[in-house]
Image: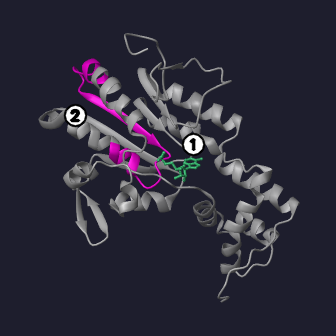
Amino acid sequence: MPLTSMTISMTTDEFERMRKVVYDRSGIHFQDAKKYVMESRLSRRLEELEMTSFSQYISFLTMGPYQKDEFQEMFNRITINETSFFRNQPQLDVFEKRVLPQLLESRKESKRIRLWSAACSTGEEPYTLAMIMHRTLGLRMPDWHIEILGTDISERCLLAAQKGSYTSFSFRSVDPLVQQRYFKQEGNLFHLNDEIKQMVNFELHNLRDTLAAKRHGMWDAIMCRNVMIYFDDEMKTSCVQMFYDQLTIDGTLFIGHSENLRGMDIPFHQMPIPQSFAYTKETTGSLK
Ligand SMILES: C[S@@+](CC[C@H](N)C(=O)[O-])C[C@H]1O[C@@H](n2cnc3c(N)ncnc32)[C@H](O)[C@@H]1O
């Protein structure tokens, strides 16, 4: 076992083949300039497998009995899973103070609200939605049926999400009072309370799989933030079309602050509220 890790070099041809595998499976597009990122992130994996070239690794990844497991392993190494509780507070304020009150009004008969956090990483985003729902509904909570789903392509992330235990790094943008209210500290870890944990379900879901998304039914709000930046235009458009199809008529899509839907022929309307990065199917009321 080597003590220090050496970068195994990847030829241009190997890079082309690797990025095709990654793209075909996940929609993530590695630009030419990102070859070194793939090379350096996967070199350690090749060493662990005692392989000396990326060609060997590509065969292992695409043929034979370990494809599925190795895809997960490879994916864990090449993706960015960065997230945090209450990430982008101004956008969440739009959800809490503008979108949610309208939803509560329009769903007052059915008392059913469905929220999907797509590409949720280690769970901070869907749990944030759960905390917002919890503090908004307060004593009315038992009367409502709130369904929150967190999905991601990474099994490792979803396992961490299900545990619901976090280090202080996940609380970079959290009001300490919220942290105290919903978490119990034990050493370096903060454990989320069961009431909030039980509000969220997690499932493996690849955004490339638009058919699987249909099985989940319709959502009142979808949050898909900070993942489409890694997709090419074709994959982005197919995701956004799928979100459009899976949103209720008065539903809202929230995307990341560095993402946009420019150039897509999908009839979403951007909410004219600064920092909202939110899109609706119809333009109604004072929100739009
Ligand atoms: C930077 S994190 C974003 C987490 C969270 N949405 C946020 O904004 O804080 C991106 C996540 O997208 C996931 N991801 C990448 N490609 C995906 C795909 N094709 N389908 C589902 N999830 C994917 C990664 O595993 C990673 O957890």
In the displayed structure image, the side of residue 3 where residue 57 appears, left or right: right
- Give the mark, 1 or 2, whose residue is nearer the N terminus: 2
Residue 163: which quarter of the image? Answer: bottom left
Mark pair 1, 2: CA separation: 30 Å
Foreground pick, 61 / 190 = 190
Check mark 1 vs ligand 1: CB closer than 8 Å? yes or no.
Answer: yes
Badge 1 marks a residue whose secondary structure is loop
Q: In the image as oriented, which residue stretches furthest toward the left?
A: 139
Per the image, the residue denoted by label 1 is 207
Check mark 2 vs ligand 1: CB closer than 8 Å? yes or no.
Answer: no
Per the image, the residue denoted by label 2 is 136
The residues colored magenta run 103-128
Where residue 8 appears, as percent x and y from the top left, is 78, 74
- Residue 123 located within the stretch drawn in magenta: yes
Foreground pick, 224 / 95 = 95
Residue 80: which quarter of the image? Answer: bottom right
Q: Amino acid at mark 1?
A: Leu
Relative to residue 142, is residue 98 depicted above or below? above
Residue depicted at 66% across the width and 64% down the height: 67
